[in-house]
Image (spheres, rainbow, N blue to C red):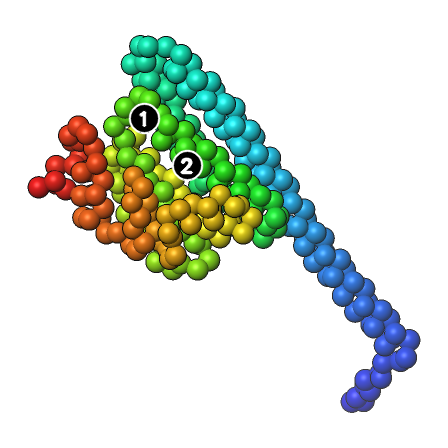
């Protein structure tokens, strides 16, 4: 039986195989590039939609604030403010809920995107300005309408305060417990280089570390635990609050 010799590949065969191999690499590279480009494009589209929606929310909040200002000016012109103050208080609460939801959307935006950090910081700055506007308005409304509510400024840092979430959890607990009777205004101090009002407030309240909360113009530069914070807040109310019994014993 005669064994057949294997034919050695000719130069032409090697050339064809090399050409096919190169074509495969090119096709694979092209597919990879298309997938990457598609993912990048979808990221841009999603970011654009998020930014557009949050900007629309910001514009609506600005209109709400102007409406509240107008109501406040009107209240200063009349003698009987009881009914109008009730409406004003409800409007303020609704607006603050919307503002809080916007902050949650901003935080989700920060986690979900790797793009448009500049736009994100701009939106966060807008939120901070709106937040402080409503804080000032709440202070004025409390005096005009004798609102029995506690206002609280919460200074925190996302970048340089690993214990700040602990204070945030305590504040969330009391906000859920007390509802409209507790007005919490968070301030991200990482923005203070671009927002002078934060530096001004830190100077006024002598804030040098984080977290810091300011309750009715009194500064607490540390994590205020639940039991202590409950006593501080509940002792401020003029009228008994049903949720404060355990903290006033």
Q: Under tag 2, what secondary structure?
A: helix
Q: Which mark is residue 143?
A: 1
Q: CA distance from mark 1 to mark 2?
A: 24 Å
Picture disc at residue 100: 2
Indicate the quadrant containing the C terminus: top left, top right, bottom left or bottom right.
top left
Q: Could you tell whether 80 is left or right of 58 in the image? A: left
Return the residue nearer the eye: 178 or 4. Answer: 178
- Which quadrant would the N terminus be assigned to in this image? bottom right
In this view, the residue in front, 93 or 69, is 69
Residue 109 seen from this side: no
Marked residue nearer the N-terminal end (1 or 2): 2
The residue located at (58%, 43%) in the rendering is 122
Residue 144 to residue 78: above or below: below
Q: Is residue 137 above or below residue 20?
A: above
Q: Nearer the viewer, mark 1 or mark 2?
A: 1
Determine the image quadrant of residue 8: bottom right
Name the secondary structure under disc 1.
Answer: helix
Q: In the displayed structure, does residue 86 sit left or right of residue 225?
A: right
């Amino acid at each position: 039986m005669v064994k057949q010799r294997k034919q050695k590949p000719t130069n032409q065969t090697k050339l064809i195989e090399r050409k096919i191999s190169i074509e495969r690499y090119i096709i694979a590279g092209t597919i990879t590039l298309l997938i990457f480009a598609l993912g990048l494009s979808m990221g841009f589209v999603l970011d654009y939609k998020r930014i557009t929606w949050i900007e629309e929310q910001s514009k609506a909040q600005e209109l709400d604030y102007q409406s509240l200002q107008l109501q406040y000016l009107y209240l200063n012109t009349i003698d009987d403010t009881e009914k109008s103050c009730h409406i004003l208080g409800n409007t303020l609460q609704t607006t603050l809920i919307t503002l809080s939801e916007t902050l949650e959307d901003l935080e989700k935006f920060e986690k979900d995107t790797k793009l448009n950090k500049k736009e994100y910081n701009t939106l966060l700055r807008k939120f901070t300005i709106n937040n402080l506007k409503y804080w000032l308005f709440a202070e004025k409304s409390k005096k005009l309408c004798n609102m029995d509510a506690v206002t609280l400024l919460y200074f925190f840092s996302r970048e340089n305060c690993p214990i700040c979430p602990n204070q945030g959890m305590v504040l969330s607990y009391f906000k859920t417990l007390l509802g409209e009777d507790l007005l919490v205004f968070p301030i991200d101090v990482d923005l203070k280089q671009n927002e002078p009002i934060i530096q001004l407030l830190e100077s006024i309240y002598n804030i040098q570390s984080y977290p810091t909360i300011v309750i009715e113009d009194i500064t607490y530069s540390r994590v205020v635990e639940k039991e202590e914070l409950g006593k501080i807040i509940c002792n401020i109310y003029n009228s008994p609050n049903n949720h404060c019994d355990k903290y006033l014993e």
